[in-house]
Amino acid sequence: MAEDGRGLNRRGFMKTAVAGAGAVLVGGGTQGTEATTGETAPASDPGRRAPWVRTRQTPDIAVVGAGAFGAWTALNLQQSGAQVTLIDQYGPGNSRATSGGETRGVRAGYGGRRTSLQWVRWARQAIEMWRAWDERGQDMLLPRVFFTTSDLIMRDEWTDFMEDVRNNWDEVGVRYEVIDADEIRRRWPVIDVTDITVALWEQDAGVVRARRAIESVAQVFRHEGGEVKIARAAMGPVNGRQLGALQLDPDEALSAGTYVFALGPWFPKAFPELMGERVRIPIGHVAYFRTPPGDNSFSFPNLPSYNFPGVTGWPALGPDNRGFRVRTGGRGRGGGEADTDPDTSRRWLQPEELERPRAFVAQRFPGLAEAPISETRSCHYEISATGNFFFDHHPDFDNVWFAGGGSAEGFKFGPVIGQYMAGRVLGTETDPELIEAFRLIPEEEEPGG
Ligand SMILES: Cc1cc2nc3c(=O)[nH]c(=O)nc-3n(C[C@H](O)[C@H](O)[C@H](O)COP(=O)(O)OP(=O)(O)OC[C@H]3O[C@@H](n4cnc5c(N)ncnc54)[C@H](O)[C@@H]3O)c2cc1C
């Protein structure tokens, strides 16, 4: 059987990858987790699989971690014709995962970082893909996950950051308006814009329901013939530069041709030597304020998502009714022993940690100043040393990939990341600039680099 340079069993992958990797929900007729023989997809339906023969009981690819990075990658690989097993220690959308929160913002407001332009491009693409996902998901009765709230970046003066965001938007073609404080007051009178002089309003930005989205991706993945396994995975036996199998807990070995690790904040725990200094895992804080009974002024679609320096959030969403969401900073790396282990860290806010969101709401949304807090969440995010995502090989293994480094921004990109990462694994994504941008270890840091 033909093998590519990285040990991936190709069996027709290259033929199907381009058509398949971009497709989200596709029509039926592709189920069957094992020993499926000779499925032939009509040429007129690019989302369905090409001719395919399976003779093995083992997966072609094992993806460890069913958060946004892993679940979307697994789905795209499965849709490209690979047989994929997706493994997660607590299950897709679990409440300890970074992707297990209620909602995540989807906006293209990036400026002032090396990665800004590329992230703006991907965010724009992601917004289209989230919309398409919801549209196609109706056929499978999947819950709607994306809501176009729009997003308002407000500042006391026009800043370099805003200038950079606007230039990036102009280059990529993002729809926006520059508005002043009077206009904000007129459109959304519940926002207190004292000291604010200017805002960038991104019309197509929105909010995605995070854990529901991951549940749905896993559901479609299963529907497509993928297998989801609940187990903790570790590196198993190796043979030179090849990983031979995963060691699963409970006790089992799982062998595949290729392995993708998408562990979010668990990377430093699973690969301490390699990732200990490359991935930081601070904790972000989220509080949900109860909206006044019967009053929709703090709910979608009557208020945009908002961005003040250091604080972001969005209106209450009808489908989940969690309340008005406020996201403040959080606990840093030195936040105590419990905060360095995502398996045991505290996931709610202490009373003193509520002071900041309360003060913010009293200042900017005074109609909620006395509102009770209905629930809180604290959650790890993963900052890579490069400041970008990493989609790269394990430096010691040709058949092991890493996907991570979400940097408190990764969820929105899930559909794009899944498509890109599947392409990397299958060898169809070859853009040298992106490959360079997503290296785990920048070239200059490599021995002799
Ligand atoms: C408070 C907060 C706010 C954020 N806001 C936004 C936002 O507005 N917009 C946005 O786009 N992004 C946002 N993010 C970032 C975004 O949520 C993350 O970038 C993204 O969810 C990361 O997904 P992931 O798949 O890399 O990691 P995760 O979702 O954490 O997935 C990793 C998975 O791996 C599993 N796992 C780990 N180790 C093992 C093992 N050994 N065996 C088996 N399974 C294992 C875990 O159980 C987990 O399910 C925010 C993050 C936080 C914390």
Image (cartoon, rainbow, N blue to C red):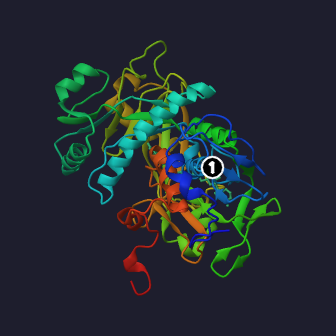
Q: Vertically, is 60 above or below 105?
A: below
Quarter-wise, where is residue 268 in the image?
A: bottom right
Residue 82 pos. (x, y %):
64, 54
Residue 226 pos. (x, y %):
69, 47
Residue 73 pos. (x, y %):
56, 52
Q: Vertically, is 354 above or below 291?
A: below
Question: What is the crowding at mark 1: few (fewer than 14 residues within 10 Å), some, or many (at least 20)?
Answer: many
Where, quadrant-wise, is the C terminus in this rendering?
A: bottom left
Picture residue at 32% right of the left edge, 32% below the top: 363
- View extreme (right): residue: 251
- The residue nearer to you, when weighing 304 against 51, is 51
Give left or right: position of 82 versus 136. Answer: right
Can I make out residue 318 in this image?
A: yes
Q: Amino acid at mark 1?
A: Gln
- The residue nearer to you, when weighing 210 against 297, is 210
Quarter-wise, where is residue 306 in the image?
A: top left
Residue at mark 1: 78
Give left or right: position of 93 versus 296. Answer: right
Give left or right: position of 61 versus 33. Answer: left
Picture residue at 31% right of the left edge, 31% below the top: 203
Q: How many numbered circles are shown?
A: 1
- The residue nearer to you, when weighing 203 against 280, is 203
- View extreme (bottom): residue: 448
Where, quadrant-wise, is the N terminus in this rendering?
A: bottom right
Picture residue at 58% right of the left edge, 70% below the top: 4
Residue 389 pos. (x, y %):
44, 59
SS assignment at label 1: helix
